[in-house]
Every structure is written in C-alpha cells, then in structure tokens.
C-alpha cells in the first residue's frame, strides 16, 4: 500500500511538472524566435522559475541560504556556475535562486522528447557525451556564449550521482573553459535533492527541504593552471555539508 501511495505521489508530481512545462512552452518559443538576446533571456528565466515553482505544489520546498544576496558580489558579466548533481531537482533549485539567466548543458537525448525536446533546444546547450566531436562543438558553443556576455550552468560531475558518495570526481571541461576565457567560477552547493527525488530505481518523490548555498568567486587568474582551479573548487564542495540530513 505504501509503495502504491509513493508511486501515485510521483505520478502526481510529474503531472504538475508537465502542466507547468506546457504553460511556458509558447512563451519560451516566442521569446527565442522573436526577441533579442537580453529580453529573450529575461523571459526564459521567468519561465524557468515558474516551471521550477511547480515542485512547491507537491511538498518540495526550496531555501536559498544567502545565495540570492551573494549574487550582488558576482561580476556583472559572464560567470560559470558549477553545482553538485544528485537529482532532477537540482536544476529547479538553481533557477529559483538565480537573478540572471544562465544556459545549462543538457544531454542531447532530452532534445528528442515531444514538447520537452523543443524546450531543451531553446534553453540549453545540448551535448552528446558519447561523441568527442559533439563535446568539442559544445566547448566552442560555450566559449562563444560566454564571449557574448552569457553565463553558464555546468554540473562538473558529468552525470547524476547515483553512487553512495556525496560527490563524484569532477570532469575538467568547466575549469579549462574558465581558464581559457578568464571567466570566474561560482560554486553552488545543493543539499537534500537526493532524498526528495532520488535518481535510483524505483524513483521515489518525497516532501522535503532543498537548500542552495553559493560559495566565494573563484577567479582563474588566481591559479597557475586549470587543474589547480578544479582541485580548489572540488575542495570547496567537499567542505560543504552536501549530505544534509533528511527533512
């Protein structure tokens, strides 16, 4: 009986998620096609926040521990936001705290889904992680986007963490990009998403509290190379209480 209730709750949650996605679909499409970069990004950010807010309706609450205020210290230009990745809830948690639009990377498979695929192609930079050519093209696209004044969201673990560890090793791409472009990195610790919506099987949705906390700005010029920057950011995440108690 408990398992049936859990599955029903999960389906209810994804139903509301789907409704929110359908609601923002035409707005994002119109903004992407007809507006300039700045106005288009403002519309996309508002739509992302609306979509992310749908998770409040089924008991997942988001708290931003100083992250909104911390953004006053961020450079007015581009930044590369990096975060740990434990769940599908990580992206909503990030966009509810952001005061500027930042383009996330996405698996190319997501762009092939009905409706959601179009949304992904409008608001993300798709990449096929199995293809070296696609990875190189994505690096070029990211570099160009940063040079145009845009910001990026990258999960440096590369994929959702399904291990027993709080954090997986980081891939070097975000840190090489930062070092090559001179764009600073801002780390954001996301806590408790694995409890609320784990990525394991069977997937279970639970009410709970998700928190985000932005760290200090990491400037690439303060480090001798990209690897030392990567290690410093990784240490910051290790020092955070990512394994937040269940709520």
Image (cartoon, rainbow, N blue to C red):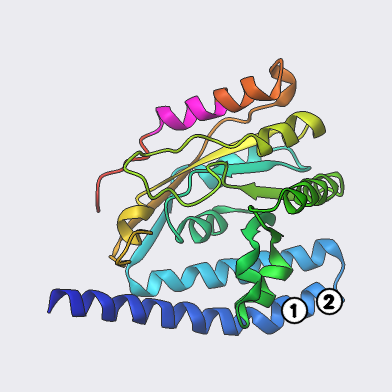
Residue 154, above or below 172: below
Furthest residue in direction left, as rendered:
1
Q: Residue at x 46, y 32 (%)?
A: 237
The disc placed on residue 119 is none
Q: Position of residue 232 (x, y in %)?
A: 56, 23
* Residue named by callout 1: 29
Residue bounds of the magenta highlight: 233-240
> Please, which residue is most extreme toward the top here?
224
Q: Is residue 239 magenta?
A: yes
Where is residue 5 drawn, in percent x and y?
Answer: 20, 79
Q: Position of residue 238 (x, y in %)?
A: 42, 29
The 10 Å Cα crowd at callout 2, few under 14, some 14 to 19, many 20 or more, is few
Q: What residue is shown at x 65% (from left), y 81% (from top)?
A: 25
- Is 46 on the left or on the right of 50, as rendered? right
* Tag 2–tag 1 contact (CB < 8 Å): yes
Which residue in the structure is indicated by mark 2? Answer: 33
Binning the other alpha carbons within 10 Å of mark 1 as few (below 14), some (14 to 19) or many (20 upward) gives some
- Does residue 238 belong to the magenta stretch? yes
Q: Is residue 121 above or below residue 156?
A: below
Percent x, y of residue 48: 60, 67
Nearer to us in this view, 90 or 96? 90
* In-front residue for pair 204/58: 204
Residue depicted at x 48% and y 56%:
93
Q: SS class of the residue under badge 1?
A: helix
Q: Nearer the viewer, residue 43 or 152?
A: 152
């Amino acid at each position: 009986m408990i398992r049936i209730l859990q599955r029903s709750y999960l389906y209810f949650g994804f139903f509301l998620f789907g409704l929110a996605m359908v609601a923002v679909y035409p707005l994002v499409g119109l903004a992407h096609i007809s507006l300039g970069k700045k106005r288009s990004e403002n519309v996309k950010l508002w739509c992302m926040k609306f979509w992310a807010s749908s998770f409040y309706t089924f008991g997942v609450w988001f708290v931003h521990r100083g992250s909104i205020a911390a953004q006053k210290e961020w450079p007015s230009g581009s930044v590369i936001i990096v975060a740990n990745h434990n769940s599908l809830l990580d992206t909503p948690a990030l966009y509810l705290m952001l005061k500027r639009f930042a383009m996330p990377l996405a698996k190319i498979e997501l762009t092939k889904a009905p409706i959601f695929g179009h949304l992904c192609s409008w608001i993300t930079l798709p990449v096929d992680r199995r293809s070296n050519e696609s990875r190189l093209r994505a690096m070029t696209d990211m570099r160009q986007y940063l040079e145009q004044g845009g910001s990026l969201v990258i999960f440096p673990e590369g994929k959702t963490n399904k291990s027993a560890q709080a954090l997986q090793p980081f891939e070097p791409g975000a840190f090489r990009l930062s070092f090559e472009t001179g764009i600073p990195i801002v780390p954001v610790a996301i806590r408790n998403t694995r409890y609320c919506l784990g990525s394991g099987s069977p997937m279970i949705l639970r009410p709970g509290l998700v928190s985000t906390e932005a760290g200090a700005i990491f400037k690439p010029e303060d480090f001798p190379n990209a690897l030392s920057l990567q290690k410093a950011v990784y240490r910051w995440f290790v020092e955070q209480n990512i394994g937040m108690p269940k709520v």
